Amino acid sequence: MAATGYRSKETEVATEPEMIQSFKQGAKRFGYLVAATMNTIMLWVAHQLLDWEWPGFLTAEYDDVLPVITVSFVASIVANLVYAWHDGWPIKPIGELVTTTIGLVAALRIWQVFPVEFTGTDWSWLVRLVLIVAVVGSALGIVTQLVNLARGPAVSGKS
């Protein structure tokens, strides 16, 4: 008798699809915990940059955008910890909507303050291009999550 699919009255053996599903769920949870850890490290680094005087193109105005950067990292950390517990509908699309909206606010604030200054070659155009991509991507992400919420769990494939 093969172990996959065999069920006796005394013991239950998981079927191969159940084992694969369990492994995938564990891998997803591990990924969420890694993401929360990495965001925590990046949050700490973000708060050290001016003290380290690195990178050299950051200006003192970086302090003006640090609060919104902090909120963005903290929201992502909290969301990933919640997803590790449960990432089904409606929690995941709500979390994605919240974190993407905060990211959009952060990108717009960075654009407004623009806490960078380059000497020699002016890379400001590239920083602004990256911010434009972030704003457009965030706007599309917000629309996508609103659609996912409106369509419900059966259509979005999450439960």
Image (cartoon, rainbow, N blue to C red):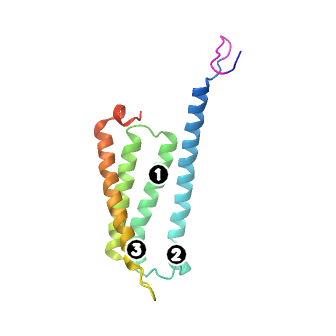
Q: Which mark is residue 98?
A: none
Crowding at dot 1, Cα within 10 Å, few <14 / some 14-19 / many 20+, comes out as: some
Which residue, as the protein is rendered here, is positioned at the far bottom?
A: 120
Q: Is residue 31 above or below residue 16?
A: below
Instruction: Pick the residue in front: 51 or 29.
Output: 29
**Contact (CB < 8 A) between labels 3 and 1?**
no
First along the sequence among labels 2 and 3? 2
Q: Main secondary structure of the magenta part?
A: loop
According to the picture, the residue beneath numbered tag 2 turns out to be: 49
**Mark closer to the observer (3, 1):** 3
Q: Is residue 90 above or below residue 114?
A: above
**Contact (CB < 8 A) between labels 2 and 3?**
no
Q: CA–CA distance between discs 2 and 1?
A: 23 Å
Instruction: Label 2, secondary structure: give it.
Output: helix
**Mark closer to the observer (2, 3):** 3
According to the picture, the residue beneath numbered tag 1 turns out to be: 78
According to the picture, the residue beneath numbered tag 3 turns out to be: 127
Amino acid type, label 2 = Leu
**Residue in the picture at 47% in, 45% down:** 82
**Residue in the picture at 52% in, 78% down:** 55
Amino acid type, label 1 = Val
